Structure formats: C-alpha cells, structure tokens
Image (tube, helix red, strand yellow):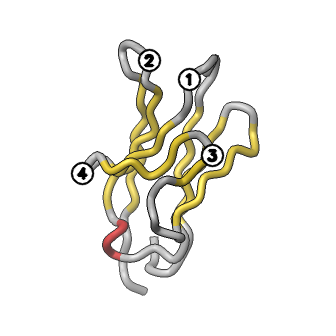
Amino acid sequence: MPIGREAALHCSVKNLGNFKVGWMRASDQAVLALANRVVTHNPRYMVTHDEPNVWILKIKSVRESDRGCYMCQINTTPMQKQLGCVDVYGM
C-alpha cells in the first residue's frame, strides 16, 4: 500500500453474543479499539461496523510506521482472533 493511502482491515464475526471485538497491533499488543470505540490517541485510526458481522479498522494516511500485522480478537475461551497485515511502501 502506498504511503498516504487509507488501509482497511476487515474482521468477520458471527454469533458475537455479549462479547466485543477488539483491535490490537500484533507486534506490541497495543490495544487500538474496542467495539466501535477507538482507544488509542491516534486520530488516524477509525473503526466502522456497517455490516452486521463485519468490523473494519481503518488507518488514514498510512505511514511506514504503520507497517505490520493487526489482530481483531474476541475474549472467548479459547480466544478467537483474525490477523491482517499492512505492507507500506513509498510511491
């Protein structure tokens, strides 16, 4: 993905029940969002939930520092997770 574009990572979850979808950066386990609420202080991150079973983490104006993998997870037992990665390059 070229620097400056918007990245969108999709997470599909069925039968969520009372659990919430969380987004984390895989490299350092930093929590970015929980349900529809972004908890990081980075205004470039946004979560949308337009479709019933799909949560989307969006990263606006991607930078090289955004390169890496991101994980959506549900704290069930055992924990359920999906991993998506962003590769960033110059134009």
Instruction: Give the residue pinned by disc 3.
Output: 36
Task: Assess disc 3: are there few (<14), some (14-19) or many (≥20) residues with their C-alpha within 10 Å of its C-alpha.
Answer: some
Mark positioned earlier in the residue sequence (4 or 3): 4
Q: Secondary structure at mark 2?
A: loop
Estimate the spatial distance between the alpha carbons at disc 3 and disc 1, rounded to whole Å.
13 Å
Quadrant location of the C terminus in the rendered image? bottom left
Quadrant location of the N terminus in the rendered image? bottom left
Mark positioned earlier in the residue sequence (2 or 1): 1
Estimate the spatial distance between the alpha carbons at disc 4 and disc 1, rounded to whole Å.
23 Å
Residue at the (39%, 76%) spot, across then down: 63
Residue at the (50%, 81%) spot, across then down: 4
- The disc at residue 28 is 4
Q: Secondary structure at mark 1?
A: loop
Estimate the spatial distance between the alpha carbons at disc 2 and disc 1, rounded to whole Å.
8 Å
- The disc at residue 19 is 1
Q: To which quarter of the image does residue 88 belong?
A: bottom left
Q: Is 55 situated above or below 32? A: above
Q: Amino acid at mark 1?
A: Phe
User: Farthest residue in the left direction?
Assistant: 28
Q: Amino acid at mark 3?
A: Asn
Estimate the spatial distance between the alpha carbons at disc 4 and disc 3, rounded to whole Å.
21 Å
Q: Amino acid at mark 4?
A: Asp
Task: Assess disc 4: are there few (<14), some (14-19) or many (≥20) residues with their C-alpha within 10 Å of its C-alpha.
Answer: few
Spot occupied by residue 16 in the image (x, y as percentages of width and height): 61, 21
Mark positioned earlier in the residue sequence (4 or 1): 1
Residues at marks 3 and 2 touching, judged by CB atoms closer than 8 Å: no
Estimate the spatial distance between the alpha carbons at disc 2 and disc 4, rounded to whole Å.
21 Å
Residue at the (48%, 39%) spot, across then down: 22
The residue closer to the viewer here, 15 or 36, is 36
Residues at marks 2 and 1 touching, judged by CB atoms closer than 8 Å: yes
Instruction: Give the residue pinned by disc 2.
Output: 76
